[in-house]
Image (tube, rainbow, N blue to C red):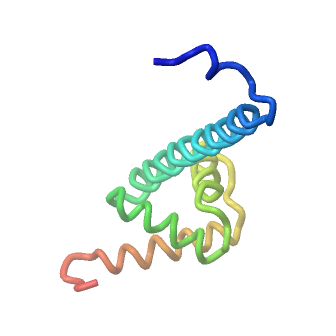
Amino acid sequence: MTTSREHRPRADGTRDATVARLEQENAQLQHAVDSHATVDQAIGVLTAAYRMPPATGFEVLREVSQHINVKLHMIAEAVIAWALGQPLPESWGHQLDAAVQRRSRCEAPGNPG
């Protein structure tokens, strides 16, 4: 049960600081949800374009992100844009092709990995 005392601002600004912290936390969580959705969409693009399982699509995105030192969600955004007809930056495209080829060889039937 709440009391009216809990809703009144305190003289020391504690309530204001708490509200600001919660607003920042909420914004961070929303960004994380948005980034996750973008990565999921990019995985879907790779799954369809290269006929690979979703887990492999994620590994390809992660590998490209690490090789070119660009955040995963930015790679995912570029892959989605590529699916919509925009070109990938040339170096990103080379890294994507190489990662797909490596994963394809690793997951080929009869290859122990």
Judged from this view, the residue extending furthest toward the left is 110
Q: Quadrant location of the N terminus?
A: top left
Query: What percent of the width, then of the height, locates residue 113?
Result: 28, 84
Please give the name of the residue rendered at 69% of the width and 33% of the height, measured from the top-left corner: 19
Q: Quadrant of residue 94?
A: bottom right
Depth check, front residue: 93 or 13:
13
Residue 88 drawn above or below residue 32? below
Judged from this view, the residue extending furthest toward the bottom is 112
| Left or right side of 75 for 58 | left
Q: How many marks do you count on the picture? A: 0
| Left or right side of 51 for 43 | right
Please give the name of the residue rendered at 65% of the width and 19% of the height, measured from the top-left corner: 7
Depth check, front residue: 83 or 78:
78
Judged from this view, the residue extending furthest toward the top is 4
Query: What percent of the width, then of the height, locates residue 60?
Result: 47, 67
Depth check, front residue: 55 or 80:
55
Depth check, front residue: 25 or 85:
25
Query: What percent of the width, then of the height, locates residue 12?
Result: 80, 36
Please give the name of the residue rendered at 49% of the width and 45% of the height, measured from the top-left corner: 41
Residue 12 drawn above or below residue 76? above
Query: What percent of the width, then of the height, locates residue 111?
Result: 24, 84
Please give the name of the residue rendered at 55% of the width and 68% of the height, measured from the top-left corner: 96
